[in-house]
Image (tube, helix red, strand yellow):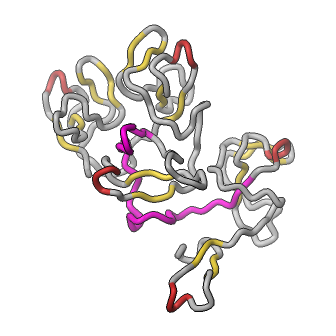
Amino acid sequence: MDNGQRPWCATTSNYEVDHKWKYCGTAAVGENLDNSPCVFPFIYKDKTYHSCTAINDQMGRPWCATTPNYDKDHLWRFCFSKVYGGNSNGQHCMFPFLYKTELFHSCTNAGDKKGNFWCATTHNYNQDKLWRYCPDIILGGNAPGKSCVFPFLYNKQMHYTCISDGESSEKLWCSTTSNYDVDKKWTYCYAPDIDTPCVFPFIYKKFKFFTCTNLAEENGKFWCSTTDNYDRDHQWSYCPA
């Protein structure tokens, strides 16, 4: 269930016996309720919004546009502040995480038949099968939900981790192909949001890392430096699983 955050109904005549249910689809601003993530900022009635708003919803429910311009596209969804779905009991997303043969540094809709965005709550979904849907998130770039490709070429230099170069907001991003200079495909990366012994960013082999990495680890486990410079101090720890 969703602790009262989203309306739901039973899909059989006896929930107590069958435990079958689904979320209810309701409409507020228009009739085009969308399952896509929120996009911030978005334009509504010529005003720019940088977060969810309850304006013009009769029940005061917060909502957001799912494209940069509601006035043009009329696509939107309700906002939900709490984690829902999955089998991880409210655990945080863990980035990066391995799914099939790809390494994801942000939420993805890969493998979800309805296109909902999700994340693993350990670094290895293939091994642990633990996941959750992503709450209202900011997706960016022109390839949201795609996996990063490392190393990638940007401004004629190779990069082995997410970077903030060229990003005025200093958000982390990565190329989703091996050559950004040619393809111009990218997405934002998510920085860790849990307590770890890691120090980000840290230097490893002269490159700056903003997330855990499994480079040079034969067992594929993710690790990080516990000082800002691994090359100098050689202090490190495995990342939380």
Please identify the quarter of the rendering in which residue 228 is found.
Answer: top left
195 displayed left or right of 41: left
Q: Position of residue 161 (x, y in %)?
A: 37, 27
| Start-end of magenta stretch | 76-105
What secondary structure is the magenta-colored segment mainly?
loop
The residue at 42%/40% (across/down) is: 104
183 displayed left or right of 194: right
Q: Position of residue 185 (x, y in %)?
A: 56, 25
Q: Position of residue 17 (x, y in %)?
A: 50, 91
The residue at 74%/53% (across/down) is: 76
Residue 116 against residue 166 in the figure, above or below: below
Residue 218 lies within the magenta run:
no
The residue at 77%/50% (across/down) is: 75
Q: Nearer the viewer, residue 25 or 28?
A: 25
Q: Nearer the viewer, residue 138 or 226?
A: 138
**Which residue of the protein is positioned furthest toward the left in this rendering?**
234
The residue at 19%/27% (across/down) is: 230
Q: How many marks?
A: 0
**Which residue of the protein is positioned furthest toward the top in this rendering?**
156
Residue 180 against residue 213 in the figure, above or below: above
215 displayed left or right of 84: left
Residue 85 lies within the magenta run:
yes
